[in-house]
Structures are given as C-alpha cells and as structure tokens.
Image: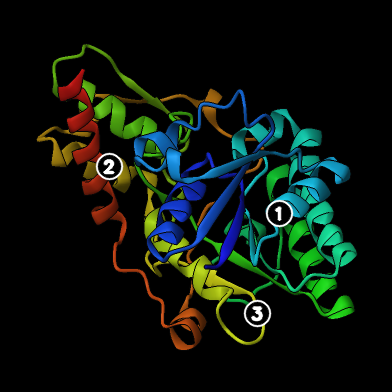
Amino acid sequence: MKRALICGVSGQDGAYLAQFLLDKGYEVWGTSRDAQASSFANLSRLGILGRIKTVSMAANDFRSVLQAISQSEPDEIYNLSGQSSVGLSFEQPAETLESIATGTLNLLEAIRFLGTPVRFYNAGSSECFGDIGAGAADENAHFHPRSPYAVAKSTAHWLVDNYRSAYGLYACTGILFNHESPLRPTRFVTRKIVRAAVRISQGAAEKLTLGDMAIQRDWGWSPEYVDAMWRMLQIDHPEDFVIATGESNSLEEFVASVFSQLGLDWRQHVVQDPGLFRPSEIRYNCGNAEKARRILGWSAQKKMRDVIREMVRYELQLAEVK
C-alpha cells in the first residue's frame, strides 16, 4: 500500500485528491496547522474524513515539516498548502509569500535532509504567466507574475526546479490553470456567482456585484485536475506540466451561462463595481496541455459550461436541503 501526505488536505484540491488516492488504495495522510481543531469540512462533505490520518503541520516552520514527514513516512507528498486567493494576496503579501515560497522550500529541504526516496508534487499556477497576450501557454512560456500570489508561486516553481537539478530529487510542478468545483470557498468569484444566481432564481431580491467582467480565463474541473497531479508522480523522471482545458472564456460569459442555466437574464441581476477591480489584473489566459496529453495520457473532459452545470446542480441540491 502506497502512502501519501497531502499538505493542504482541507482545501478544494486536497479533498478531491484524498478521495482519488483512497479509491486507488493509498493510505492517505493530511496536514492542517492544527489538526485537532480543524473541522476538515470538505473531507466530511465527501464522506472520507474517517479514512484520513491527520497531522498538524505549519509549512513555514521547518521543524514542524520535518516532524510531519517523519511521522507519516510517505511515498508521495503533494504540496497544495498556502494562501490560495489572488485577491487576498494584495492585502496579505508577506503571509502569501511565506506560506507558499517558504513552505515549499521547507518541504524540499526536509526531503533532502531525510534522504528518503519521496516523490514530491508542487501546486503551481497559471498566474505565474501573467498576461499571455494570445494563444495558449505551454511549459516553455515565460513567467511574468502580476500579483503577490503569482510571485510566490513563481518562486516555489523555481525552488522545485533547483532542488530537482541540484540534488536529484523527484520533484515536479503542475502549472494548473483555473479549476473549480462546489468545494470552492465562497470568496472565489465562481462560487460567489453560482450561489447568488441560485438564490435569485429562488426569489431572493438581491443584486450580484462583480468587478472586471471582461477578463478571460481557462476554467476546468478540479476532480479531473487531481488525476493529473497523481499521474505526474507515476512517470519515471520528474517533469513540469501545464494542466488546462485549452478553452478561454470571459467572466461575463461565465456569468451569462450560470444565469441561463437557471432561466434568467444576467443583465437584470448583475452590477459592476470598479472598487472590486484588482490593482494589477491578468486580462487573458489559456493553457496548452498537449505535453500532459502526450506523456501522461491526460486531457480535460469538462470545459467551462460543464463545470457550471455541475456547480449549479450542487448548489440547487444544497438549497433544497436547507
């Protein structure tokens, strides 16, 4: 039985990855800053909390990281922890850099220090590319980070590259484009849109307030993306991979599709607030996952409208339960 340690198991990707690995027969360990106090709500929602071994770990504390790895003795480590909101990173730049970059460094250094043959996956981000301009970014595209979050993710990416080349670690980064699910926190714009639209469809007299709706993103489905993470650690030699759908849509198109699925005209229910615009924004992104298709046998099956359909269905079911 393989053993995996998921750093950030309580988040969207961490929960789906835990479920995925359990289905493959893994023994799964997951970290939280305080495992005894954490509710692990997403694991409970998926019905798998009782099957996960949890351990407390602060990624920015090297001793804590060393203890967590020594206790769990994993074959594979998935680094999904750290501050995950681009918007929040403008308000908390120091915490964002520390939790992502320093956290990644501590994990890499602990693996090197222990000398065990651990395979390490690092969660990268398409935010590192900045504005792509046109076309789709692959693994050779240059980084031009436009937020503290993207700067932190870029730093972590190059740390992984350095430890792989300098010390021979099996370490790789998945450069993931936007991927969504019902497990997204409500501070993320996709979940915010879906929840508000469902409430409005059921008679709520409210307006949905959004920022820049002209931005374009490549939106995929989180449960498919954790499959790609796992595949990256199964090949003989570690490599970095872009994971994306290859389809880009504007936020306005996302909003229109959500309201349309509920039989509503979004123009009657949405207002734009310039105060929600970010200090620095990516206008367009799109990913080219051809390398993942060729080497990992992975390609996205769900595109934006499929993702929306799943999220709307879940939110309607949640409303019925309430």
The amino acid type found where label 2 is placed reads Met
Task: Please tell me which residue is depicted at 31% across the width and 46% down the height of the picture.
Answer: 254
Residue at numbered disc 1? 153
Q: Which mark is residue 311?
A: 2
Is 193 left or right of 168, judged from the image as shown?
left
Label 2 sits on a secondary structure element that is helix
1 or 2: tag closer to the N-terminus? 1
Which of these two is toward me, 174 or 212?
174
2 or 3: tag closer to the N-terminus? 3
The amino acid type found where label 1 is placed reads Lys
Marks 3 & 1, CB-CB < 8 Å contact: no
Which of these two is toward me, 318 or 216?
318
Q: Residue 268 location in percent, x, y? A: 20, 25
Marks 1 & 2, CB-CB < 8 Å contact: no
Q: In terms of image quadrants, where is residue 197?
A: top left
Q: CA distance from mark 1 to mark 2?
A: 27 Å
Residue at numbered disc 3? 239
Is 181 left or right of 55, judged from the image as shown?
left
Task: Please tell me which residue is depicted at 85% across the width and 70% down the height of the picture.
Answer: 115
Q: CA distance from mark 2 to mark 3?
A: 32 Å
Label 3 sits on a secondary structure element that is loop
